[in-house]
RNA sequence: GGAGACGUGGGUGAGUUGGCUGAAACCACACCCCUGCUAAGGGUGCGUAUCCUAACCGGGUACCGAGGGUUCGAAUCCCUCCGUCUCCGCCA
């Protein structure tokens, strides 16, 4: 959630910043009004409560002293009655404010480039030269078929469309990649965690998936549980509603989880192959950082994900997302896009974001800064998306006969 | 899933005939004083959120697992849910 006090006190600046993310000024004006209304409603209610409390105290005193209470009782009853509409007004104001506030995306950093959508993202650099083929490189689904690596039909039979089964060496490669990623992250200082793959609604709200993006999530029937769309949810919320000591920062965590997404709104995109599935594996990095240090941590995370791609010998480019392409919670995001020779384009394989205090405010993650509690900064990033790495290896390491080489660094894992 | 017990501040732990308890005491922690040597004495402070205010000075409100209810007034009574422990059932 954005800082409502900041919005109130620096309205022009705040609304200019959010325009980059496509939030119109009217919405923000409404938000500001609702905030003021809530404050006024609460002030009135709290004054009445103070009155009630002091009269109640007197009431007890009268009874102890054996005084007559009929007059006081009348006053206190009247005040109680008068509080009912105040209570209602405060409740409504709060509901209106938060239902709107929770749907407002995070401020982008000032350095984030302007832009409407992914077309206007800024390429920062390319790493590793794409290999030149003396034959026509195939797309991963064709290679999958040749090698018997991915059983799309049976994935659909077992679940529904956009589910797949990996078989044989593909399944082993998937597992090898997970191990390689986790080992690498651990060597960089990330603690490895194995977390629940279902989280409750409060956690999903903490990281920003709820309430706005409920349609993208798989919900467990009859339970307050959702299948996680990313390990960012459980990892970040490890410290939900906690106060960390300053010297515990930064907290660096990594974990492998499957991720479950309905992919609502992406009908018709990437329907062929395994680029966009309802379930996919990912190894995630999450950092909880001191607000003054989150930029350093961010750079470290980008570097780490990049190093993994380099180690795998996969060509990629580093892209800074423009305001319009930035996710709901992100203040800044860098994507790593891996080269897919079969598709002849770069495709996202990692996304590293700094959410600043946006998630921390929702999830109430603070640290002790001297005597005071301050919100931390939270960061997350894939290192890496496993299924897409598998695809990238297939397409980049293919031979003319359709066979696929295993990258050197993975051999010890196979 | 069934039965019983329980859920208080960083920790231990008082507080269940509703009011003087936002919450004793002890420990831990922080600062100060005394003392002076491997041990200890004294003092003060020590939850979170939010509002008023220039203010982390003062004051209001809320919070004793969560959410409702009864009442002038609830940590204390009632309901629902969550969790913990024990026994049973089930199971990797």
Image (spheres, helix red, strand yellow):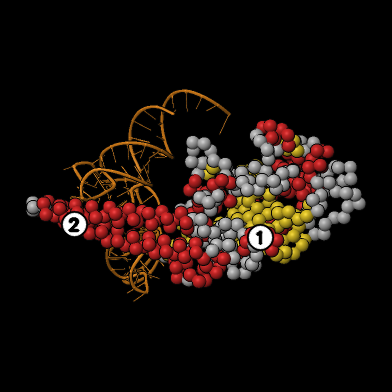
Q: How many marks?
A: 2
State which quadrant residue B32 falls in: bottom left
| Residue found at x 55% / y 62% | A23
| Residue found at x 69% / y 56% | A305
| Residue found at x 89% / y 42% | A401
Find numbered disc 2 in the image and state the secondary structure of the residue it sits on: helix
Q: Is residue A76 left or right of residue A140?
A: left
Residue A26 showing in the rendered view: yes
Q: Is residue A243 left or right of residue A234?
A: left
State which quadrant residue B68 falls in: top left
In front of the other: A253 or A74: A74
Residue B79 location (% of width, % of height): 32, 36
Q: Are marks 1 and 2 in contact (CB under 8 Å)?
A: no
Is disc 1 surrounded by few (<14), some (14 to 19) or many (20+) residues within 10 Å? Answer: some
Residue A213: image tag:
none
Find numbered disc 1 in the image and state the secondary structure of the residue it sits on: loop
- Name the residue furthest right: A134
**How far apart, in angstroms, are the residues tagged by discs 1 and 2?**
60 Å
Residue A39 location (% of width, % of height): 36, 62
Report the quarter where the C terminus of chain A lies.
top right
Q: What residue is shown with label 2?
A: A55
Marked residue chain, label 1? A
Q: What residue is shown with label 1?
A: A117
In front of the other: A212 or A352: A212
Q: Earlier in the sequence, mark 1 or mark 2?
A: 2
- Establish whether labels 1 and 2 are both on one chain: yes
Marked residue chain, label 2? A
Q: Is residue A361 left or right of residue A160?
A: left
Q: Is residue A264 left or right of residue B33?
A: right
């Amino acid at each position: 959630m954005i800082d409502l006090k900041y919005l109130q006190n620096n309205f022009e600046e705040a609304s200019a910043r959010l325009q980059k993310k496509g939030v119109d000024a009217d919405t923000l004006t409404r938000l500001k009004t609702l905030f003021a209304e809530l404050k006024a409603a609460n002030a009135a209610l709290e004054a009445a409560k103070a009155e009630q409390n002091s009269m109640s105290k007197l009431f007890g005193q009268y009874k102890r002293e054996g005084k007559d209470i009929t007059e006081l009782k009348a006053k206190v009853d009247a005040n109680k009655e008068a509080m009912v509409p105040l209570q209602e007004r405060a409740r409504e104001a709060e509901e209106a404010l938060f239902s709107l506030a929770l749907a407002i995306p995070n401020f982008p950093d000032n350095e984030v480039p302007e832009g409407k959508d992914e077309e206007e993202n800024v390429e920062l650099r390319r790493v590793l030269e794409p290999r030149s083929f003396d034959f026509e490189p195939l797309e991963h689904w064709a290679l999958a078929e040749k090698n018997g690596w991915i059983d799309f039909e049976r994935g659909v039979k077992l679940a529904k469309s956009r589910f797949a089964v990996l078989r044989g060496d593909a399944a082993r490669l998937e597992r090898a990649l997970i191990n390689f990623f986790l080992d690498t992250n651990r060597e960089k200082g990330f603690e490895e965690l194995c977390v629940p793959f279902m989280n409750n609604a409060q956690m999903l709200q903490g990281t920003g998936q709820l309430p706005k993006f409920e349609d993208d999530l798989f919900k467990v029937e009859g339970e307050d549980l959702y299948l996680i769309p990313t390990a960012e949810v459980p990892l970040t919320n490890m410290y939900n509603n906690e106060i960390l000591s300053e010297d515990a920062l930064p907290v660096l965590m990594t974990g492998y989880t499957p991720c479950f997404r309905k992919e609502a709104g992406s009908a018709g995109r990437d329907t062929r192959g395994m680029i966009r599935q309802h379930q996919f594996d990912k190894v995630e990095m999450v950092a909880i950082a001191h607000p003054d240090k989150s930029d350093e941590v961010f750079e470290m995370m980008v570097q780490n994900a990049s190093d993994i791609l380099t180690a795998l010998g996969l060509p990629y480019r580093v892209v800074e997302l423009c305001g319009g392409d930035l996710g709901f919670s992100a203040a800044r995001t860098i994507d790593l896009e891996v080269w897919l020779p079969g598709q002849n384009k770069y495709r996202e394989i990692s996304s590293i974001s700094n959410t600043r205090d946006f998630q921390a405010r929702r999830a109430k993650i603070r640290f002790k800064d001297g005597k005071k509690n301050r919100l931390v900064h939270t960061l997350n990033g894939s290192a890496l998306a496993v299924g897409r790495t598998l695809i990238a290896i297939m397409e980049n390491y293919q031979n003319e006969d359709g066979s696929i080489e295993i990258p050197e660094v993975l051999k010890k894992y196979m």
